[in-house]
Image (cartoon, rainbow, N blue to C red):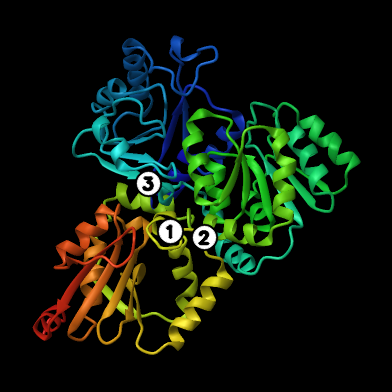
Amino acid sequence: MRCLTLANALSDLGAKATFVAAAMPETIAARICERGHRLVRIPAPADMHRPDAGWEAPPLSRTSQLADALATQAAVGKVDWLVIDHYLLDVIWHSRARRFTRQILVIDDLANRNYDCDLLLDQTFGRTAGDYRALVPHNTQILTGSSYALLRREFAEHRAAAIERRKNPGPIRRVLVSMGTGDPGALTAPIVREVLAAAQGCVIDVVVGAHVNGREQVRELAVHHPQISVHLDSRRIAELMSNADIAVGASGMMSWERCCLGLPSIILVVAENQRKGAEMLAKSGAALLIGRVDEIRGEICSLLGDAELVARMMAAAFAIADGFGARRVVHAILDKSTLGELVLRPATLDDGEQLWLWRNDPVTRAQSRTSVPITWAEHIRWLAAFFDRPGGKLYLAERDALPVGVVRFEPLAPRGYEISIAVAPEMRGSGCGKALLEAGCAHLPAGPIYASVRHDNAASRRLFASCGFERVKDVEPGFLRYALELTDDMSRRRNGE
C-alpha cells in the first residue's frame, strides 16, 4: 500500500509505474490495476517461503537474490527509478539491479542490513538518518521520520476539517476499531468485545478485511449490538478516522493515518518492525500503548473520564504527520529540493493553527521548557496574550509561499530581546535554521539578543555559535545562555543596506 501511494503521487506528475511481485493479495492487485499501473508477477525464490520467519530474518541467499533480480529485469527492462520494498533483499540484490536502473530507492524500517541505493526512506517516527549512515553509500540521501509517511491523498484532504473539529473536542461518542486489512492474530472480535464493555453508549465502527479470520464473529456481534457498524475492505478509512473520537488499532502505517487526522489511539504491536514507532508514539503522548487485549477496557474508561488527556493526545497526534509525506518523497526523487529565498512576515492570529502544530512537534516539545502537548485552547489564549503585550515580535518564515519556520522575540528590561526559533520538522537539516535566525535578527534594532538552549541540544548550540552568539553566564538550570550584541552596522548589513 505504501508503494501504491508513492506510485500514485508519481503518476500524477506523468510517471509510468510497474509493480513487480512474487506474491500479491488479489485485493491489492485490483487497486494497483484500478489506478492504471502495470502489475507483473514473477516466480518466488524457493527460500522466500520460510515457516514462521520474523521481520529480522536474514536476507535471501546470494543465489536467490541474483535470480530474483534477473527475473525483475526481465519483467521491466530499463527503468529510471527502481523502488525496492522488501525485507529479505539487501545490497546483493540492489547492486545487481544497477544494471537496469539509473537510480534506486529503498523503503525500509529495520535498519538491519547493508543497502546500495541513492535514496533511502524510513517513515518510522523517531528514526534518524544516523541509524542508516553506516549501512549505505556515503552519498545516499536518507529520508527518515513520519514527515515522510506515505499516506494516501484522502488523509490530507480530510485533515483541515479534522483539525477544526478537534480544536474544541466534545465527549467521546464514536470509537473506531481497525487492526488493518490482514489482522493475522484475529484480534478484532476480542477487541470489539472489550470496547463494548467499556463504551456502552458509543457508536463503534469496525474495519476488517473481507478475508480476515474472525470476521464472522465481528458480524455476529454487530447483529446483536446495533451500535456496531462493520466496514469490509473499506475505501473510506480517512472519513471514518475523521469522524471518530478515539481509535483502537494496530501500529504501523495506520498510526500515521490516525495522527494525520488527530485521532487519539490505543495501539497494539502486531509485528516487531512496528514496535519502535509504537513506543515513540506513546512517548509523544499521541497514543496509549498496550500489550494485551484485556487492557483495552481500562484504557477506554480512562479516556472517557479525562477530557484534557484526550485533547492533549489530539494535539500531539496532529503534529506527527500531516499527510504530505508522499509529496516530499516525490520532490526528493525528482530533485526538486531547491527553494527560493526565505522571507519573514509578521505573524497574526490567522497563523495560530500552523504555530500550534509546530509547537506540538515532539522534537520542539523536547527542547522546550514545557514538554507536554499544548491543547488548542491553551495555545490560542497564549497567542492572543502575546499580541496584546507591547514590544513582542513574532515572524513567520516562508519560502516559495510555504511556511518553513517561526521566530519570536520577547522584550527584556531594560533593553534587548530573548529569541526563540522553531523550524518546520520537514525542513530540519536543510540549513533553514541559520537563515531563519539571521533573518530574524535583521528585524531588530541595535542591542543585546539572548537565547536559552537546553544543555543537551547540540544542534541549537552549534546554530547560535555559527551566527555569532557567545556563551554567557547561565541563569536557568538545564539551559545554556547565549548572547549577541547587535550593533547598528550589523543590523544594516543583515538588512542588505
Which of the two labelled residues, at mark 2 and mark 3, occupies the earlier sequence position?
Answer: 3
Q: Can you tell which of label 1 and label 3 is closer to the viewer?
A: 1
Q: Which mark is residue 15?
A: 3
Q: Can you tell which of label 2 and label 3 is closer to the viewer?
A: 2
Which of the two labelled residues, at mark 1 and mark 3, occupies the earlier sequence position?
Answer: 3
- Residue at (32, 19) in percent of width and height: 70
Position of the C terminus by quadrant: bottom left
On the image, the x and y values in percent for residue 185 come to 66, 26
Disc 1 to disc 3: CB gap under 8 Å? no
Callout 1: helix, strand or loop?
helix
Q: Which mark is residue 373?
A: 2
On the image, the x and y values in percent for residue 432 come to 26, 63
Mark 2: give few (<14), some (14-19) or many (20+) Cα within 10 Å. many
* Amino acid type of the residue that numbered disc 1 sits on in the rendered structure: Arg
Callout 2: helix, strand or loop?
loop
Q: Please give the residue where the numbered disc 1 appears in the rendered image.
A: 365
